[in-house]
Image: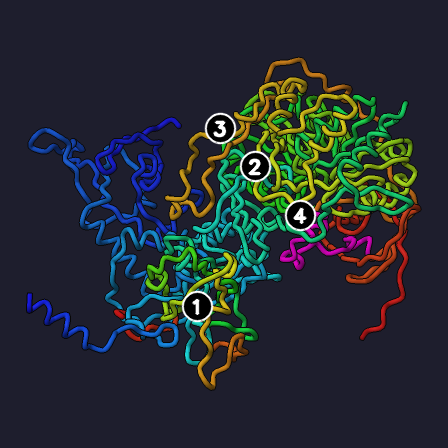
Amino acid sequence: MADKVTLTIDNQTVTVPAGMLVVDAAKVVNVDIPVFCYHPKMEPVGMCRMCLVEVGRPMRDRATGEPILNEDGTQKIGFSPKLETACTTPVSEGMVVVTDTQNAKEGRKAILEFLLTSHPLDCPVCDKGGECPLQNLTMEHGPGESRFIFDEKKRLQKHVPLGELIYLDRERCIQCARCVRFEHDIVDDPVIHFFHRGRSLEIQTNSEPGFDSIFSGNTTDICPVGALTTADFRFGARPWEMKKAPSICTHCAVGCNMTYNIRREAKSGGQTVIKRAMPRQNEQVNEIWLCDKGRLGYHFVESEARLSSPMVRKQGELVPVSWEEAYQVVEDKLRQDQVRMVSLAGGRLSNEDLFNLAQLTRSKNGKNVLYSTMAGGDLTAQVGLGLGSNFSDMGAGDVIFVVASDLHQEAPIWWMRVKQAADRGAKLIVANGRPTRLDKFASHVIRYEYGQEAETMDVFLPGAAVPESMVDAVKTLTEAKNAVVIYGSDGLGLDESLHLAKSCAKLVTDRGYYGKVNNGLLAVWDKANTQGAWDMGFQPDRNLKATLREADVAFICAADPAGDDPVLAKALQETDFVVVYELFLTETAKMADVIFPVQAQPEREGTFTNGERRVQRFDVVVNALPGTQPDYRITARIARQLGLGLEEKSPVLVVRQIAQKVNNYKSINFMDLAKVEEQWPKMGREDLYYAGTSYENMSGLGVQYPTAADRGEELSLGLLIKSEVQPTTGSGVRVLPVTALYDRGRLLQPTNLLNHRLTKQAICFSTALAEKYELTDGELIRVSTPDWEAEVRVEVDSQLGDDVAIVARSNGLPVWEPVVVQIQHLVTEPKA
Amino acid sequence: MLKGLFTTLKEALQKPVTIQYPEVKRPVRTRFKGRHELRRYDNGLEKCIGCALCAAACPSDAIFVEASENTDEERYSPGERYASTYEINMLRCIFCGYCEDACPTEAIVLGDQYELSYTDRESSIYNREMLLVPVKEGAETTPQKTEPGKFTRSVPIMQDPTD
């Protein structure tokens, strides 16, 4: 910041950037100015009047402009006759702010007394009681008694569901509009509004389903009273009764930091259980937010369906056995000569699990396969987002180029942060085959035909021929100070993803947008630790079917190929020996020869590497389900019997080995991951009123490992020449896979609260296609490919391009790459 | 000395004060702090709203509360919240009465019962069924089915806030 301003707040002199608000400047020197409506992440509105302070400015002679001095020669300060709101007053040179005068105290007292005239006294039953800014500030600044008549309190509805996730208590609302402003300004979901005026004012939702926002849970954090509460936690416990345990969200590649609140419960048989998930501040990752999937999607941990004993197939039946026996069976198999081993790992495993598994597989000269349809993890490790990059620092002069990604569904928090960067002036180029929620904020929207992703990116290469429609976008990119290219998996299979990743990598290298802060390539991975899996040596396999079929021993960890795809299920039948590490009895597990029950992520320690290559640590939150083991330990135990030295005692030791053996992770040390530094805005338990109930980060911000470009090493991007794409042709309709946030993935299923929000199980056709095949919205059709057939609903979307049909991944249909399907009409069901 | 002997003589002729416990029980004082009771309103609803302030106030961590949500179909207490689990470990309890002070609805009250002995630790834990007083004659026990919109408030409107 160029301009600095020096001012005095309660006798403390502070120098802050010009334009900062008095309330923030006070926070810098730890002077508390109480607020309700102000929030450091939002524009000030000055509605609640709680932040009244006395403000004085240096006096100047009106005629000459000369400073007026006191008799003793010091600058004379003129205090304004009335109190000013600290949240709307920007700092100015020489300003004097006093927060503890009699006048200011009385101002605050009066505001609180007034707020309490219509606030119920139900703190004992309120979920916010104990961590409530209004409660705390009343204790600190409020009057002990009210002069208003108790019987004249306004009685309003106390139980208004705004949708099934969030409840509103109208009486408690103090009309600060933080929730409404958050939904409108920060996440662009204008689904809740103020209605009526004055005391009758209420928050209403106008969407179907109610409060239809994937960020709705955040409003309960920033609500300064208990007006908005989540259905998930409702009356779950009192805030002071719960302990906190730091963790990392398992659901997407953003790697949001969160804190689980846990408590021992009689209801759960005296077990410690997770009561709620709260965001933990990490200004480089999720700031202080969390999407609803992350907030509510932890229920898989307590699912009844969890596996709790190893099983071995005996005479065709899976029977529970002891751990020793199960290890022995696997060991015997691996001891045989010439075993072709394949390890298929999903991206929700931790780095330690993946490392150990990769080592075991390598010792048998086997193949490490990543269960993913996205490519390019080797590229992001070399020309990925530069060290120290932060979406919050991007603004005017920077370009963010999002290609083939419905970021809103694939990585909600990144969507929000990219959108905010665009609000700050960063130029946004969005290229996709269909409209997405990001288009609205884009400077340039490029619409390509699905399959043309890589070709579209090539237009941006230096010296490429530019079609008329893209001239402006190319100009924007070439003029950018910094540029980040984000690619996703919208409508892509593995082949297409590979081409796109290569094109993107070529673009950033040819244009020089890599190896610097706020530059580089970012992949919107499908799973939380896909980047880590790439780093540990796993790569997706373009011919997974054959690989599985030819394998003698297949280790399948945190993946359910058989349940996802009938083709893979068939291939797996031909695999001689299948070992599965799983939480649940999935379709793959049912086909296994040995099943090892594993611990869920909140039951164990470990590290994840998020899409930005930030290695983050998660702790043990709850006791592990009896009879389960963490994945890395199972692998290490098998390895021990084979004479291979892998660490099995603790992730700390595994990370030490990783640092030795994996080049990118040289600088990673388990202790460093727990380091914290002060973040802005300051927040935490004493400052509830300021930024909400999100947790202060005291457990580690994680460490971003440098890319090869950051380290100045020579890049080996391989040939960035595309091999031929097999066009998916043939008669029939080409259906493309896209990602939906609320899918029917195994980890999300146990969260019953989200049942009504799950993406519809339907194929979404464009109007043109629907007309061509005479499909009507809601109709049930049979779709078939040579490998599978299914009955599915039709949805018609007028926004899709002419020959586009899309279906959500992991939502019932085994579409993982663009496939051509045959459509058959079913006889219309008789109407009941 | 004669005066002393006279006192002895006088006392010897008095009726003995020994009470034949347990056949005869002496009534306790009004401020006696005995075993806790969970009170009910006249209509049978429980006063306890599961706020756990008693547990927070308890210096010996003897109280454990878990709350759940009332519905009009199945109502235990006025308002939205009730205690689905309420346990007091009488071995831990020091009968200080802080819970009584903390209670916003005067639901928990230290009663007259002082005969507390156990043969094992588990039986020292009193659950909500043991602590709840019986309903008054003519009132219905909980859970009750109530008409919607009648019992919307957990902390009933106070008649005299200074009380």
In the rendered image, residues at marks 1 and 4 fall on the same chain: no
Label 4: which secondary element: loop
Q: Where does the magenta region start and end? A: A741-770
In the rendered image, residues at marks 2 and 1 fall on the same chain: no
User: Cα distance, mark 2 to mark 4?
Assistant: 25 Å
| Rendered location of residue A662, percent (x, y) | 67, 20
The amino acid type, in three-letter code, at marker 2 is Asp
In the rendered image, residues at marks 4 and 3 fall on the same chain: yes
Q: Which mark is residue A619?
A: 2
Q: Which mark is residue A675?
A: 3
Chain that bears disc 1: B
Q: Are marks 2 and 4 in contact (CB under 8 Å)?
A: no
In the rendered image, residues at marks 2 and 4 fall on the same chain: yes
Label 2: which secondary element: loop
Of the image marks 2 and 4, the number of the one nearer the N terminus: 2
Residue A170 seen from this side: yes
Q: Are marks 3 and 2 in contact (CB under 8 Å)?
A: no
